[in-house]
Amino acid sequence: MASSPPYPPHPGHPRWWQRRAVRYGAPVALLALSGLVILALVREQTGTDGFLVGIGLAVLPVPLLVAAFRWLDRVEPGPWRNLLFAFAWGACAAALIAIVANSFATRWIATATADPTNADTLGATVIAPVVEESAKAAAVLLVFLFRRRDFTGLVDGVVIAGVTATGFAFTENILYLGNAFGTDQLTGDRGIASVTAATFFVRIVMSPFAHPLFTVLTGMGFGVSACCADRRRVPRVLLPLCGLLLAMSMHAVWNGSSALGQYGFFAVYAAFMVPAFGLLTWLAVWTRQRELRTVREELPAYAVAGWLTPAEPFVLGSLRARGIAREYARHHCGRAAARAVAEYEACATSLALLRHRGRGGQAGPDFVVREAELLRELWVRRHIARPALQHAAGRVWPEYEYGRAPVPRPVPWAPPPLPPYAVRNPYLT
């Protein structure tokens, strides 16, 4: 008698690869393993003393770069777990892929051509840009695919790509600075004339933004792709590829500057890197200001429907007013209230950008469900957020009608139930 086929899993019990422990545990284990391997490889090449000196010097620009990208993301801040994943991928997985692939490719070219000098030059200008930018782009792709709700526009692509490249540059700087320190130990050089000082000046002082600048081009490609409608499949695929190719090209030009003579590095730095950095920085800041303008234009519709007060679209469209609201909540009700106000501001921003994409035909099939989720998140935080936002309106715009009335003190926040009419609201059906 043939055995009956196994019963399908109960819909309430996810399969093993869908479980939370697997979805989070597998990437953490993979990144931890790659981190241990890359640290062992770097320590083997630099020695223990060089490894420790490299870590101490390479970590200096990391807080500044992460803070700069987090500042760009203030309008609609993404979750910290995405940034931690991006940094860990760049520092561990991408660095491991790059060091193994670059070493293998350079040795193969040297063996095939019997010319180690040209092999090193070709590896730095052709192989390294392709391998490194592809390895870093993998982190942006993973966030784009598996954290799609957190990846909605150009700024998100810039931030994820920039933090990934910051992690990659951190590990690479450990290797370069550690090797430079080992060279100084052998030659006895000390002070500002040492190889360590020269490497620190070039990589940490002059060009800490080099790797983030390259990979940001890839992130911008993914960011623009995220703004495209689902039916436009060709642009959604080609835009990230174009960004990746631009990142590889800029990386190749940067690495090839050493072959342009004694002052080739400074010529490329002044004529190419600095203008590109300024242009991309301006574009990122302009995009952030456009998001604030979108908030002011889209949220009044929800104020008319009764979900927001009339002042909130203007307050939520101003970073200064948003900061005043969080500080007011923190002063009167503590840090938990300030976090609730920050979450209210983030949800309202996501709601405005979602509506903007929906009006442009770029929203996905889950538009109504996502809108309902965001409206509920706003509603359960309204008791603590509204007095704080009302206070901010009076502070920023004294002539506004809310500034002429006494501002009530906020009460300790607790999630209240939805109003009776919410059941009849089409957004929640």
Image: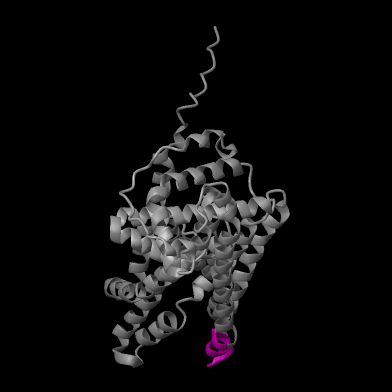
- The x and y percentages for residue 337 are 33, 54
Which residue is found at the position 34% from the left and 73% from the top? 46
Residue 264 painted magenta: yes
Which residue is found at the position 53% from the left and 53% from the top? 350
Residues 148 and 168: in front is: 148
Residue 136 painted magenta: no
> Dividing the image into 4 quarters, which one contains the C terminus?
top right
| Residue occupying the far front of the picture | 405
- The x and y percentages for residue 198 are 39, 87
| Residue occupying the far top of the picture | 1
- Height in image: 108 above or below 408? below
- The x and y percentages for residue 145 are 56, 50
Residues 330 and 211: in front is: 330
**In this rendering, would 309 be left or right of 301?**
left
Magenta-colored span: 258-270
**In this rendering, would 191 be left or right of 159?**
left
Prevalent SS, magenta region: helix
